[in-house]
Structures are given as C-alpha cells and as structure tokens.
Image: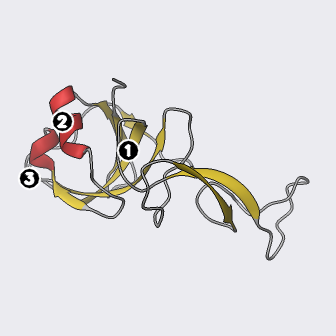
C-alpha cells in the first residue's frame, strides 16, 4: 500500500507536510474534495480541515466534479492541471486542451492530499514549514 502524504496549508501562508500511518490513511479513504472533517482522526486535536485536492501515484491532479475513483481525460480550460498558455508560454483566451485527471474521491491510488485549515486548534501544527512560493 502506498503511504499517503498530507500537505496542510495554514492560515499564515505556510504549508506543513506529513506522512500518515495506515490507520489515519484508512480514515481519509472515501472522502471527497470539499469535505470538512475533524483533525482528531489524523493527530491534530482541535483542528478542522477542508480537503482541497491532491494527486495520484503518477502525479495526475484530482479534479472536483469527476465522480468515478479513476483517471479520466477531460477537456479543460484554465483550471486544475492546465495554466491556459500555449507552447510559446503566451496566454490565449479560450485555449482548451485534453488533460488526464483523477476523480475527486480519495482512494488507494491517491499519493498526496492537500488540506486547508478551517478552524485552528490550541497546539501549533509543528513540523517542517515549507515557504509558499510567490
């Protein structure tokens, strides 16, 4: 089984990474993008998190709106998995392309999950802080 990594985006702009144990991973399975849950289940008491996205073991991003827990080729505009620029790195209005994306359900093929802090707990998140790129 692939270990699940979480990236927690704090309100101060820093992000924290952690690898989950098997019990904590089982709790996150069958959650969808946009679900809120208590942090007590993954070792952060008092926190409340919002699941905002992630990627699978091949690096394909999760996309909200795809109900199946598998990969799918979607025609996308400027959104998750595509920045809206052509080959010459120029932005074009109405540019669309086919991209492979994953469904919104957390399954065993998902390798990384992105979380956002909705309610802070009394303890700091701790761990190594990764500065947000600007």
Q: Quadrant of residue 42?
A: top left
Residue carrying label 3 = 46
Front residue of this view, candidates 50 and 62: 62
The residue at the far top in this view is 1
Of helix, strand and loop, which one carries label 2? helix
Q: Residue at x 33, y 26 (%)?
A: 3
Percent position of residue 73, x then y: 64, 54
Q: Secondary structure at mark 1?
A: strand
Give the mark nearer the N terminus: 3 vs 1: 3
Local packing at callout 1 (Cα closer than 10 Å; few below 14, some 14-19, many 20+) is many
Helix, strand or loop for disc 3: loop
Side of 121 relative to 125 (left or right): left
Question: Mark 3, residues whose alpha carbon is within 10 Å: few (<14), some, or many (≥20)?
Answer: few
Please give the residue where the numbered disc 2 appears in the rendered image.
24
| Circle nearer the viewer, 3 or 1 | 1
Q: Image point 57% across, 43% down: which residue?
A: 60
As measured in the structure, the alpha-carbon distance from the residue carrying label 2 to the one carrying label 3 is: 16 Å
75 vs 3: above or below: below
Going from N to C along the chain, the mark reached first, 2 or 3, is 2
Choose mark 2 or mark 3, whichever is in front: 2
Residue at figure coordinates x 46%, y 63% from the top left: 64
Q: Give the residue drawn at x 42%, y 61%.
A: 67
Residue 11 placement, left or right of 24: right
The N terminus lies in quadrant: top left
Judged left or right of residue 49, residue 100 is right
Asked whether residue 103 is in view, the answer is yes
Please give left or right for residue 92 compared with residue 66 in the image. Answer: right
Residue 113: assigned label: 1
């Amino acid at each position: 089984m692939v270990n699940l990594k979480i990236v927690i985006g704090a309100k101060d702009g820093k992000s924290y990474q952690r690898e989950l144990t098997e019990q904590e991973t089982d709790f996150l399975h069958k959650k969808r993008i946009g679900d809120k849950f208590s942090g007590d289940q993954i070792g952060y008491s008092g926190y409340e998190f919002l699941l905002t996205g992630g990627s699978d073991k091949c690096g394909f991003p999760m996309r909200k709106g795809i109900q199946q827990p598998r990969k799918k080729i979607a025609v996308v505009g400027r959104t998750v998995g595509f920045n809206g620029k052509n080959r010459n790195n120029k932005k074009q209005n109405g540019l669309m392309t086919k991209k492979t994306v994953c469904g919104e359900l957390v399954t065993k093929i998902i390798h990384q999950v992105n979380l956002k802090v909705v309610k802070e707990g009394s303890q700091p998140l701790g761990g190594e802080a990764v500065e947000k790129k600007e």
